[in-house]
Image: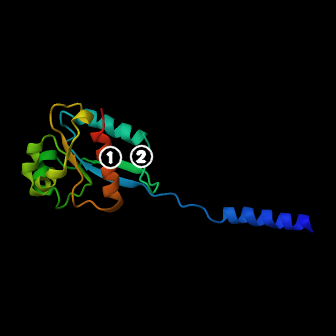
Amino acid sequence: MRQGWLYLVLASLFLGLGCHPQPKPVAVVVHVFRDLHSPYGFELDHRILEFQASNPRLSSGAPIVIKTFDDLDYDTALKAHFDSDLRVEVVILNAPADAAKNPAIAANLAHAVNICAAAKACPADVPAFVPSSATGDQAQAAQVFITTLAQYK
């Protein structure tokens, strides 16, 4: 009789554990707008690769994936496309003066951080920010990326 109960308890335990698989978290893609041909482009490429290699995740466990926006020329996108048909979660400017080319970028420049150490461009000011249009998990993931760049030594 005891053996029967033991088998019943063990079978229930194994069946119970196997019936509730945890769903795999969906990756959060952070779209980054930057000048691929900037003097800091090569260093930023390295920082992005280092960030990805660190297996970054949100507190929910969702992995963070960085995708650089490269469909338009930097100046063209700044002047005519940003915040109309170009939606990104991170903006990295070559210089603060570039913000004057677009009112939406100029409005966000106040909360930009200087990532000159990550770009190996110090003492130049390399502003990076999460636009106010970014929301939810993408905004949170973008902030993780910006914070990592700002803390680079």
Q: Label 1, label 2: how many angstroms apart (C-alpha)? A: 9 Å
- Left or right? Give the position of 82 relative to 88: left
Residue, disc 2? 56
Residue at the spot x=29%, y=40% of the render?
149
- Left or right? Give the position of 29 relative to 77: right
Q: Amino acid at mark 2?
A: Pro
Of the 4 image quadrants, the one containing the C terminus is top left
Of the 4 image quadrants, the one containing the N terminus is bottom right
Tag 1 secondary structure? helix
Indicate which disc, 1 or 2, sits on the residue closer to the N terminus.
Answer: 2
Residue at the spot x=6%, y=50% of the render?
100
> Mark 2 and mark 1 in contact (Cβ < 8 Å)?
yes
Image position, residue 117 (x, y; %): 24, 33
**Vertical position of residue 33 compared to residue 54: above or below:** below
Are there few (<14), some (14-19), or many (20+) residues within 10 Å of tag 2?
A: some
Residue, disc 1? 145
